[in-house]
Image (cartoon, coloured by chain):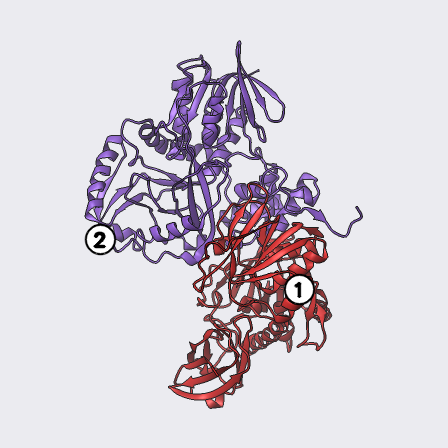
Amino acid sequence: MVDTLIIGGGIVGTCIARELSRYEGTVLIVEKENDVANHQTIANSAIIHSGHDPIPKTLKARLCVEGNAMYELMEQQLHIPILRTGAYVVATTSEEEEILKVLLERSIENGVLGATLLDAKQARVLEPNLSLQTQKVLSLPSTKVTFPWEVAIRAMQNAIRNGAEFRKNTQVSSIRKIDNGFEVATTNGEIILAKHVVNAAGVYSGVVAGMIEKNVPYTITPRRGEYFVLDRRVKGFVQHVLYPVPTKAGKGVLVVPQTHGNILLGPTSTHQEEPERVGTTREGLDYIRKQAVKLAENIPFDQIIRSFSGIRATSTAEDFYIKESNEVKGFFHAGGIDSPGLTAAPAIAKCMVEEVMGGSISLRKKTYFDPIEPEKKAFHDLPDDEKKALLRRDPRYGNIVCKCEKITEAEVIEAIHGPLGSDTIKGIKKRARVGSGICQGGYCEETLLKIIARETKKRLDEINYYALNTPILIEETKVKR
Amino acid sequence: MKTDICVIGGGAGGLAAALSSNDDGVSVLLVEREGHLGGILNQCIHNGFGLEVFKEELTGPEYAERFIKEFEAKKIPHLLNTTVIDIRKTKDFLIDVSNEANGLFTIEAKAVILATGCYERTRGGISIPGDRPRGVMPAGSAQRYLNIDGHLVGKNIFILGSGDIGLIMARRMTLEGAHVHGVAEIMPYSNGLTRNIVQCLHDFDIPLYLSHTVTDIKGKDILESVTIQEVDSEFHPIGGTEKTFEVDALLLSVGLLPDVHMFESIPFEKSQETKSAVVNQFCETSIEGLFVCGNALHVHDLVDWVTKESQKAGHFAKQFVKNPVRGKSNLKPVETGGFVRVVVPQKIDFGQMENPFELSFRVSKKMEEGILRIEQNGKTVREKRYKHLAPAEMESIRIDPSFLSGDHPIRLIVEEVVK
C-alpha cells in the first residue's frame, strides 16, 4: 500500500509529488498518457503571471502571487528556464484606461510588486512595436515566462530523486473506499492500494472526484485555447508579455515572448465538450490574427511555424478547489485548476501538502531532501571550453541531429535514457527540442526515429509518435509476409 | 582547416558547384550533412532526371551517381556527416562545423558556395486547422521513409498540394499497395509538371481536386479523416462543399523553401519573394565571396537546371578566388511588372559585366500566350513572345548586355496576350 497516490502527471500533480517527497511515506503518481505534461501543461501561454487579474481574496489571487515568487527558487533548484519579461496590459480606448485603473488597484490588493501605469510614450521606449493605438499600459514587472513542460519534467525528476514513483499509461477507472484507505483500479486491470489519494487530474478532476463522491463540489466545463507559434528568429520583436485589457471572456489574445526566442500569439477561449479534442479551427486562428494586431504593429505572421490548441479545466467553482473531500476523508482535491494554474502550481502544491493534507493527516519531514536537479543547458548554448570538455567525454555531441535548433545526438540520447526518459518522437521533442524549428522535424524526424530504435533496441516500426500505438511507420515493404 | 572555396551541401547543386570550381590550382572543400553524397536525389528513385544535361532519362540516384563518380575521380576533398553550424566573415569566411569524428572546428575559406537545397513547407507553415494526430507529414518525409527505409507511413492516403513530390508520391504509394484517395490543390491549376499529372494521377485513376484545400483533420492519436472544401477566388472555403476521406496519412506537398536560414551570423540581404538571398548575375549575395545556387537560391523545376546554375556559381566563385581585386561594382536592381511574380537574379552588376547573363522568372498567372518585355529607362530593349506561361513553370531568358546601359534599373514585364 502506498501512502499517497497522485492522479495526474501535469504541472500540478508533478509539483505536488515533489512537495510530498519532502515528507516520510511513499508517493506514487499515475498518468493516463504516455508522458508527463501532456494536456494543459504542454499547451498554454507559458506565462508566470504577476497576479493582476484574479479577483482579490480568491485562492487564484493568493496562489498566483505566491507561485510567481516561488518560481525564483524553482529556477535555482530545478534549473528551469525563466525569462524575465515583465508585462504590459495595453489600453487602446479611454474606457479601457478606466479598467487599467481598476486592475492597478486589484494588483496592489493582491500584493503584486511594482505594478504601475505608464503612458504610451514611456511604454514604447522599451517596446517599439507596441500598437499605435496604445493610450496607456499597466506595467507588471514581476510577470515572467517559463518552459512549462520542462518545469513538470524536472519537478517529477526531482520527486523521483527523492523517492517518488511515476507510472505512465495508467488510467484510473474506479476508486473504492476501504478500511484504511482506497482501492484504486486502473484500465490496465491493476489494483493500487493507497492510504490517501490526491486528485490532480486536470480536465478529468471532476470525473475522478465523481468516482468517490456523490456530490462533487465543482463541474469541469473545459475551455479550449488556440495559439500560433512564431519562429525563434523573431526574438526581440517584443520584450514584454502583451495583454489586452481583460473582458468577461478572459484575458484575451496575448503576444508572448518564449524562453527559446519564439513568440506565441493566442489564446482563443471557446467552450469544448470533449476534453481530448484539442484541434485548432479556422475561425479560432483567424480570430487570433485579428486580435493580436490590436497589441502590436508589424506582427511577423510570415514566421508562423505551428499552431496548436490546449484545454483548460475551467470549473463551475470559479476558483481553484483545493480541499479535502467533504464526503470521504483522505481524498484530496486539486480541482478546477485553469489559468493561472501554471503560475500557481508550486504554491498549489505547498498549500495542498502543508495546509490541506497537513491539517488532516500527520506528515513528518524527511531528514534528507535533495531539492536540486542539476543544470542541463543545451549544448550549443554552452561556452566553447565547456563544449570541448563535453565533446571529449562523448563525441556524439559533435553529431547534429536537429540542424534548425542545433540539437546533438548526445542530447537526444540523454533525453531517451534520462531519469524520466522517453522513447517517442514527441517525448524527445519535449525534452531536447528536436524538431522545434522551422522545418518542424521534416529533416530530423527520420534520424531521431532511428536513434530511438537503436537506443531502445526496437524495430523502426515500433517507434511511436507519442501515445502507445501511434507508430510513424506502419508497414515494411519488400518483405515476405 | 583552410581552403579556397568551401561548398556547403553535397547534393546536385553542391556537386556541380564543386566540380566546376575545382580547377587550375583552386582548392575546394565540400561539406555534407549526411553520410552520403547525392542529397535528395538519393530518395528520388523515379525517372525523368537528366534529359537536358545528359539527353537521357535517369533516376535520381543514377543522376547523382554520374556526378559522384566524377567528384571522386577528381579526389575533391570533402567531409561527410558534418553539419555547418554558422558562418562568420572576417577578411575570409570562417565556417564553424561539427561532426562526431572531430567535434567542433572551423574551416577558413576565401569564398563560400551555399548549395544547401530546400526544405518542405509544413502544416504549421500554412496553418491547416484540426487535430494533431500522427500521420500528417511532408510528402518528402514519406518518400524518404518509403524509398530509403522501406516503410509505408499509411495505407489510405490523401495528398494536399499538387507539387511534383506530391504527385510522385501518389504513384509510389499506390505501387506499394496503399490506396491514394485523392490530391487536393488550392489553385485552379496544378503546380506540378504536366508529365507528372498524367503519369502519376491519370494513369492510376487518382482524382485531382483543383481549387480545393484541406479544412479539417480529425483523429485523437492516429489520423482518422481529412475534410476538403472547395475554395473561392480568394481561397476562402465554400460552405456545403465538404468532402471527407477516411485516411491514415495526409501527405503535404505545399511548397519548398530555400534552406539558408541556419547561418545566423552572416547577414546577407534576403528576398521576400524567394525566401533566399538577393544575388547578382554571378549568384553572389550582398556579401562579396558568398555565393548561393540550386534550390538554396530558388526552387527549380528540374534538377538539370540546378546543375547548370550551380556550375555557373562554381565558375564565378573560382573567378572570384583567382581575381579577388575586381572593378568597382555598379549594382542595378531587376524590377518586375505585369504578371512577373519572381525573378532571379534580383540585381545586375554592370561594373563586372562581360558576358550575356540569364534571368529566370515565374509568372503569377496561367496564360495561353504572353509577351515578355525588358525595359530600361522607360524604353523596351527586348521583347519575347511565349506560347504558354504558368506559375508552376520557371522560364529563363538570356540577355546580351550590349543592349543595356549601366545607368538604370532593368524592368522585366510579362503581359497576357488576349485574343
In this orientation, does residue A181 appear? yes
Name the chain letter of the residue that bears numbered label 2.
A
- Are there few (<14), some (14-19), or many (20+) residues within 10 Å of tag 2? some
Q: Residue at x 51, y 77 (%)?
A: B367
Q: Residue at x 48, y 80 (%)?
A: B326
Quadrant for the N terminus of chain B in the image: bottom right
Residue nearest the viewer, comparing B209 with B30:
B209
Q: In which quarter of the image is residue B48?
A: bottom right
Residue that numbered label 1 is attached to: B200
Residue nearest the viewer, comparing A364 with B142:
B142
Q: What element carries label 1?
A: helix
Q: In which quarter of the image is residue A464?
A: top right
Q: Which residue lies furthest to the front in this view?
A: B240
* Residue type at tag 1: Cys
* Residue type at tag 2: Lys
Q: Cα distance, mark 1 to mark 2?
A: 60 Å
Q: Are marks 1 and 2 on the same chain?
A: no
- The percent position of residue A119, horizontal first and vertical second, equals 21, 49
In this orientation, does residue B27 appear? no
Q: What element carries label 2?
A: helix
Q: Color of chain B here?
A: red
Mark identifier at residue A121 = 2
Residue nearest the viewer, comparing A269 with B269:
A269
Q: Color of chain A here?
A: purple
Mark identifier at residue A161 = none
In the rendered view, would you say B177 is above or below A33? below
